[in-house]
Amino acid sequence: MTNEEFIRQAYATAEVKDIPAWVACFNPDGAFVHESIGVTYRGPSEVGKPTGNRMDAPCCDGFRLEDGRIQLFDCYPSGTVILGQLGVLGNLGDALQQQATV
């Protein structure tokens, strides 16, 4: 399998939220860096958390493969993706109103 095929397969795995298969795409000490919130998830017990908990699928601006698996996955989800997942975009007026009263 080429590197491109591997990454495409990894993305497809994340999109269907097959967390065990997603975690298996990483090296044991591999890291998922969620740049929008400044958090690094490292190792098998953590790298599946962002995909399973907050994201429909990761958006990646950079990754590094080592030994045919992901060593580093830099994730930069767009602001609209994050706001949509939080339900803010569907009720933007209330979200802005609440912010204005704080």
Image (spheres, grey):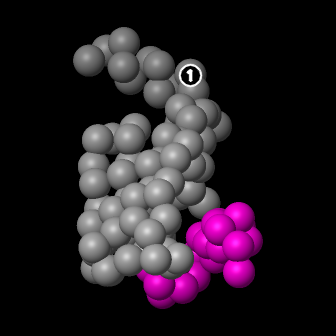
Residue 5 screen position, x and y as percent: 73, 71
Residue 15 screen position, x and y as percent: 66, 68
Quick check: is 57 in the magenta stretch? no
Quick check: is 17 in the magenta stretch? yes
Please state, as top left, top right, bottom left or bottom right, where the N terminus lies in the image.
bottom right
Residue 55 screen position, x and y as percent: 53, 57
| Residue 98 in view | yes
Q: Residues within 10 Å of mark 1 (few under 14, many from 20)?
A: few
Tell me: residue 56, above or below residue 14: above
Tell me: residue 13, above or below residue 77: below
Residue 31 screen position, x and y as percent: 34, 63
Which residue is found at the position 38% from the left and 77% from the top? Answer: 27
Looking at the image, which is closer to me, 35 or 66? 66
| Residue 49 in view | no
Q: Give the residue at the far top of this rendering.
A: 100
Which residue carries the number 1 mark? Answer: 93
Q: Which residues are magenta?
A: 1-24
Say which amino acid is labelled 1.
Gly
Which residue is found at the position 55% from the left and 43% from the top? Answer: 61
Left or right? Give the position of 10 relative to 4: left
Looking at the image, which is closer to me, 19 or 72? 72
- Which quadrant of the view contains residue 87? top right
Chief SS of the magenta region: helix
